[in-house]
Image (tube, helix red, strand yellow):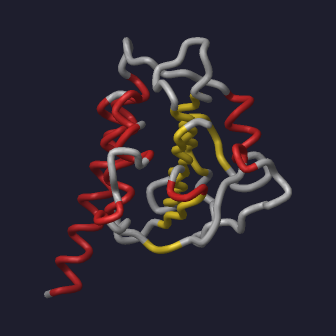
């Protein structure tokens, strides 16, 4: 019985996340910065991805999420189940990964200065909902960096990888 409940919850969560991504991607009028250069710099050669879902470097031009750098990509179906090792040769602002831990993310550590609290509302309700769902999922990964000012999320079961950071 417990296995059946777990399977039903997993399928329901997957359906909600998938629907959220599709609705967000197809809805017009949402601010969706698409800085593919930033996405390539963060995820290129690190994780296999097919498209950029959202990318904003937090810079002064067209800033949707002031003071935040947010990059999210749609992973290829062949993405590894385990997250990649961080490439410490990359500049910190372009690095993806770190000391990975399984989700759910420890809520007790979220504060108003935490990137997931401070930054994701500016990306629109659908992507914000997807990111919030990922941090609570049972089969995803997260890593914190820069004293908690950066959160990396990796969820191949949902086809998403994201980096959310308070811009320096």
**Where is residue 145 drawn, in percent x and y?**
59, 59
The front one of 156 and 143 is: 143
**Where is residue 12 drawn, in percent x and y?**
24, 59
**Where is residue 31 drawn, in percent x and y?**
44, 18
Which residue appears at 85% of the width and 57% of the height? 89
State which quadrant residue 84 falls in: bottom right
The front one of 97 and 29 is: 97
State which quadrant residue 104 falls in: bottom left
Which residue appears at 59% of the width and 50% of the height? 75
Locate residue 85 relative to residue 128 in the image: left or right.
right
Which residue appears at 38% of the width and 18% of the height? 30
Instruction: Work out which quarter of the rendered image holds the C terminus and state it.
Output: top right
Q: Is residue 148 above or below residue 140?
A: above
Locate residue 74 relative to residue 39 in the image: left or right.
left
The front one of 122 and 155 is: 122
Locate residue 30 relative to residue 55 in the image: left or right.
left
Instruction: Work out which quarter of the rendered image holds the N terminus and state it.
Output: bottom left
Q: What count of labels does the image hold? A: 0
Q: Is residue 29 above or below residue 168?
A: above
**Where is residue 119 drawn, in percent x and y?**
42, 37
Seen as rendered, the residue at the extreme left is 1
Which residue appears at 38% of the width and 56% of the height? 134
Q: Is residue 168 above or below residue 115?
A: above
Seen as rendered, the residue at the extreme right is 89
């Amino acid at each position: 019985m417990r296995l059946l409940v777990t399977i039903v919850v997993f399928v329901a969560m997957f359906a909600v996340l998938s629907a959220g991504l599709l609705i967000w991607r197809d809805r017009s009028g949402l601010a969706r910065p698409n800085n593919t250069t930033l996405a390539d710099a963060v995820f290129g050669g690190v994780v296999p991805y097919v498209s950029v879902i959202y990318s904003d470097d937090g810079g002064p031009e067209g800033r949707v999420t002031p003071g935040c750098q947010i990059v999210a990509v749609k992973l290829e179906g062949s993405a590894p189940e385990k997250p990649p090792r961080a490439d410490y040769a990359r500049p910190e602002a372009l690095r993806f990964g770190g000391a990975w831990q399984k989700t759910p993310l420890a809520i007790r550590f979220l504060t108003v200065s935490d990137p997931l609290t401070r930054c994701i509302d500016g990306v629109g309700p659908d992507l914000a909902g997807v990111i919030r769902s990922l941090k609570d999922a049972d089969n995803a990964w997260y890593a914190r960096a820069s004293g908690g000012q950066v959160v990396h999320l990796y969820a191949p079961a949902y086809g998403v990888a994201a980096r959310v950071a308070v811009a320096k």
